């Protein structure tokens, strides 16, 4: 078989595969969801605080990727109903996965309030004095009997470990329950922002007490 | 014939005899007509038994006066007032002290003056309201002794009782036993000395054996040194060779590290933290993959096509079923 005939055969085969794939996709249309025909989801982001400049402070802390509690990960806005029933908010999504959002928020918020240089995903190879593990236990919208009872619950546990000797410097848990104060998704997102700001203030103050232990 | 007496002669004789009698009396009484005396008062605390009128007052062992009168102090009957007369040439001043002494144990008391040798001391003069100057007094040692005698007697009685307890029959038997044991011990020691020569001879024998053993040990050590020396030389040679090899290896490692110091430092400073964090991320990833594989194994369609789940509608405030 000559080179010309081989390439011709391969080209014909690839065209057959492409046609088959197209037919499969069209045929499976009713089976595989490609999205509904309803209105597009509203996409929201957290209001990240301004970062502080602590590059010369001497204390560098690496913020690890948060470990999320059950049902809290993803881009959907988690909703906690009665009897521990969980669902998500219809028509509303976050711009990024919640672990990434929470981590970015903590990096900025803690850096601004604690006086330490907090490192996130972008500074993987920078030498740090401590590692801040994050465990998110609650990060959800909790509807009440009426709109005035709605609230946003956030509970985050921080684990501060010194790299030098792997010593556990502290493991506090910060809990905030913030009233939503409205009946639409903008109010819910604003509740998440206020809750995260409160958590950031508390955690930043706690990190500030351990600056010496994490100095390089 | 009537005797014709010479009145003149008789009268002269009588007068001469009387004058001689007076001179003799004066001589006999040792009356010092030329002496001048000063009177003093002395107050003694307590008894002055043995002291009488005309008892002697001594100064430096010389009788310099006598006691004129003894009476109780009208203001304090516990004190005795003694009026003495002392020759004027005796230095009596404010520093002079009178003490009652006794001549042996006969009970005859006399007064001794001492002190007052300082020429700067002021002369003793009667104070206002006093008839005569007063010489200070102090108690005599004998007087103090007699005063404390009752206590001494009590102590002696107590001591006697203790000694009696100590020397009871049982203790005396024990002491007798101790003495007997001591006697036996000393006897044994005396007998033991008879065996001393035998013991010395045995020691000499032991020392001779020890000397022989030492000589043998020396010979053994010398032999061992010779044997070990050969093996040791070989061992040292091999050790030296090994050390040279190790040194060369270390030099090579050292050179390699020196040549790559920058790279090593960079690795330690930058890559190690990255590796550490990467391990953490890999751990999370591995856990997620494990969870995904479990879901695929349990229900592959759910992974591919998703699950039917309800969503919460803010407007209706209810959950809405939705097919994915």
Image (tube, grey):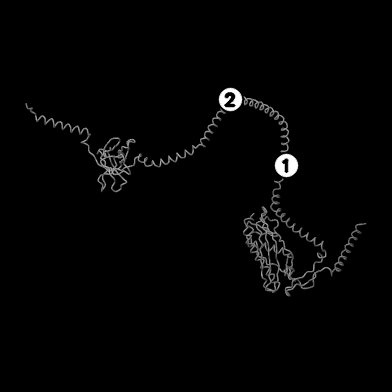
Asked whether residue B320 is in view, the answer is yes
Give the structural element (helix, strand or loop) at label 1: helix
Residue B162 picture location, percent across and down: 47, 40
Question: On the rendered image, what quadrant is the C terminus of chain A found in?
Answer: bottom right
Q: Nearer the viewer, residue A115 or B265?
A: A115
Q: CA distance from mark 1 to mark 2?
A: 77 Å
In the rendered structure, which disc, 1 or 2, sits on the residue that comes first in sequence? 2
Q: Give the residue pinned by disc 1.
A: B249
Q: Residue furthest left?
A: B1
Q: Residue furthest bottom?
A: B316
Residue A147 picture location, percent across and down: 69, 74
Tell whether B62 sits left or right of A42: left
Question: On the rendered image, what quadrant is the N terminus of chain A found in?
Answer: bottom right
Q: Give the residue pinned by disc 2.
A: B194
A184 to A66, vertically: above or below: below
Residue B277 picture location, percent across and down: 71, 56
In terms of image quadrants, where is residue B227? Answer: top right
Tell whether B319 sits left or right of B24: right
Tag 2 subunit: B
Asked if disc 1 and disc 2 are in contact, CB closer than 8 Å, the reply is no
Tag 1 subunit: B
Q: Residue furthest right?
A: A1
B319 to B252, vertically: above or below: below
Q: Nearer the viewer, residue B184 or B125?
A: B184
Q: Residues within 10 Å of mark 1 (few under 14, many from 20)?
A: few
Asked whether residue B117 is in view, the answer is no
- Residue B119 is tagged as none
In terms of image quadrants, where is residue A118? Answer: bottom right
Q: Residues within 10 Å of mark 2 (few under 14, many from 20)?
A: few
């Amino acid at each position: 078989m000559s080179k010309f005939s081989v390439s011709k055969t391969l080209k014909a085969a690839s065209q057959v595969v492409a046609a088959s794939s197209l037919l499969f996709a069209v045929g499976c249309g009713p089976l595989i969801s490609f999205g509904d025909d309803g209105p597009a989801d509203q996409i929201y982001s957290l209001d990240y605080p301004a970062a502080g400049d602590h590059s010369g402070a001497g204390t560098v802390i690496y913020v690890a990727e948060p470990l999320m509690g059950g049902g809290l990960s993803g881009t959907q806005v988690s909703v906690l109903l009665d009897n521990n029933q969980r669902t998500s908010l219809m028509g509303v999504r976050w711009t990024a996965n919640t672990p990434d959002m929470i981590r970015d928020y903590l990096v900025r918020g803690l850096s601004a309030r604690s006086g330490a240089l907090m490192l996130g995903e972008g500074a993987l190879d920078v030498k740090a004095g401590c590692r801040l593990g994050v465990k998110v236990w609650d990060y959800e919208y909790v509807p009440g009997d009426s709109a005035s009872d709605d609230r946003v619950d956030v509970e985050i546990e921080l684990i501060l470990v010194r790299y030098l000797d792997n010593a556990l410097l502290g493991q506090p848990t910060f809990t905030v329950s913030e009233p939503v104060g409205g009946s639409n998704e903008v109010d819910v997102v604003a509740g998440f922002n206020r809750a995260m700001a409160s958590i950031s203030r508390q955690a930043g103050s706690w990190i500030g007490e351990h600056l010496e232990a994490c100095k390089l | 014939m009537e005797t014709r007496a010479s009145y003149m002669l008789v009268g002269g004789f009588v007068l001469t005899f009387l004058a001689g009698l007076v001179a003799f009396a004066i001589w006999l009484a040792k009356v010092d007509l030329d002496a001048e005396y000063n009177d003093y008062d002395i107050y003694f605390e307590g008894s002055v038994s043995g002291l009488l009128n005309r008892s002697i007052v001594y100064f430096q062992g010389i009788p310099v006066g006598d006691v004129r009168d003894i009476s109780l102090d009208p203001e304090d009957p516990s004190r005795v007032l003694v009026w003495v007369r002392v020759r004027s040439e005796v230095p009596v001043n404010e520093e002079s002290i009178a003490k009652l002494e006794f001549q042996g144990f006969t009970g005859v008391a006399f007064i001794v003056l001492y002190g007052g040798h300082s020429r700067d001391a002021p002369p003793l003069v009667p104070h206002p309201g006093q008839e005569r100057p007063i010489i200070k007094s102090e108690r005599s040692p004998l007087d103090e002794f007699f005063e404390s005698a009752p206590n001494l007697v009590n102590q002696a009685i107590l001591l006697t009782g203790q000694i009696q307890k100590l020397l009871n029959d049982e203790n005396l038997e024990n002491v007798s036993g101790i003495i007997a044991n001591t006697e036996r011990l000393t006897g044994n020691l005396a007998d033991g000395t008879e065996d001393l020569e035998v013991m010395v001879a045995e020691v000499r024998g032991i020392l001779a054996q020890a000397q022989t053993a030492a000589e043998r040990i020396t010979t053994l050590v010398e032999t061992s040194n010779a044997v070990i020396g050969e093996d040791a030389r070989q061992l040292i040679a091999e050790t030296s060779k090994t050390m040279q090899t190790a040194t060369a290896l270390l030099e090579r490692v050292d050179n390699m590290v020196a040549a790559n110091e920058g790279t090593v430092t960079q690795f330690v400073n930058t890559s190690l933290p990255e590796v550490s964090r990467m391990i953490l991320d890999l751990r999370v990833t591995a856990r997620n993959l494990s969870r995904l594989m479990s879901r695929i194994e349990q229900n592959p369609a759910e992974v591919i096509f998703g699950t039917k789940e309800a969503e919460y509608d803010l407007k209706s405030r209810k959950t809405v079923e939705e097919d994915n």
